[in-house]
Image (cartoon, helix red, strand yellow):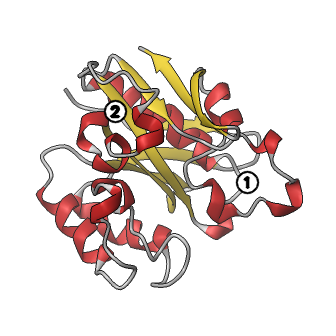
């Protein structure tokens, strides 16, 4: 099955589109992630590909790892958002079983259904600084749901942050890379469990 690029007209005079992250879009993804050492440039979306005990130090070449992954992947491991054709954001999505960093998380293991082989997982979001607050993450999540649906997913889950339980002056953008509960609720997800008071597990059945 193929995924049709999702497009939206926003209230502001700009147009958003979302496309699978294929090898020919690598330079666009580099633009989203920014310079090495920036957030999220240190990670390059490798955090959930290893179990907690196997995670590499920051010094590892995560950029090269993501480039190799996208180049070799039979199915794109994520999506890239564009605002007026400029690269603006990224999200990783795939089968939950393919993320050791999710399945190896002891807190998540206590609340997740380990038998559902058709559940997909949205791990994280990265939005380029000039486009933060413009609805890019929302567009990415909606497109991720459709991408998962087109590839046979029975449900999509995520593990965002419930910022209502945090002091507003202490919530940094770097702490919200898994998204917020409000973001998931707006996309039709419902809470099914919590690992911590501010960390719900959100699920949308397709």
The residue under the point 66% across, 26% down is 185
Tell me the element at label 2. loop
Q: Residues within 10 Å of mark 2 (few under 14, many from 20)?
A: few
The reply to whether residue 131 is in sight is no
Q: Nearer the viewer, residue 74 or 2?
A: 74
Q: Is residue 195 left or right of residue 153?
A: right
Quadrant housing residue 119:
top left
Quadrant housing residue 128:
bottom right
Q: Is residue 149 left or right of residue 87?
A: left
Q: Residues within 10 Å of mark 1 (few under 14, many from 20)?
A: few
The reply to whether residue 183 is in sight is yes
Residue that badge 2 annotates: 4
Residue 109, image x, y percentages: 39, 34
Residue 161, image x, y percentages: 65, 44
The residues bearing labels 1 and 2 have C-alpha atoms spaced at a distance of 25 Å
Q: Quadrant of the N terminus?
A: top left
Up-down relation of residue 57 to residue 174 (above or below): below
The residue under the point 70% across, 38% down is 197
Q: Nearer the viewer, residue 57 or 152?
A: 57
The residue under the point 35% across, 50% down is 101
Q: Is residue 6 left or right of residue 116?
A: right
Lower sequence index among marks 1 and 2: 2
The residue under the point 40% across, 80% down is 58
Front of the two marks 1 and 2: 1
Q: Which mark is residue 133?
A: 1
Residue 205, image x, y percentages: 45, 14
Quadrant housing residue 170:
bottom right
Up-down relation of residue 97 to residue 53 (above or below): above
């Amino acid at each position: 099955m193929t995924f049709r690029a999702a497009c939206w007209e926003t209230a502001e005079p700009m147009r958003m589109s979302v496309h699978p992250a294929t090898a020919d879009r690598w330079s666009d993804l580099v633009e989203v992630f920014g310079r090495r050492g920036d957030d999220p440039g240190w990670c390059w979306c490798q955090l959930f590909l290893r179990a907690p005990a196997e995670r590499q130090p920051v010094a590892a070449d995560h950029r090269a790892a993501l480039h190799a992954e996208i180049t070799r992947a039979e199915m794109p491991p994520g999506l890239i958002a564009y605002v007026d054709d400029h690269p603006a954001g990224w999200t990783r999505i795939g089968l939950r079983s393919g993320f050791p960093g999710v399945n190896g998380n002891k807190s998540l293991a206590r609340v997740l259904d380990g038998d559902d082989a058709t559940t997909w997982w949205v791990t994280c979001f990265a939005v380029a600084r000039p486009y933060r607050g413009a609805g890019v993450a929302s567009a990415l999540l909606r497109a991720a749901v459709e991408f998962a649906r087109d590839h046979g997913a029975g449900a999509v889950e995520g593990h965002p942050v419930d910022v209502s339980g945090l002091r507003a002056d202490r919530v940094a953008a770097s702490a919200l890379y898994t998204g917020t509960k409000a973001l998931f609720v707006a996309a039709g997800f419902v809470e099914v469990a919590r690992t911590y008071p501010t960390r719900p597990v959100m699920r949308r059945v397709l």
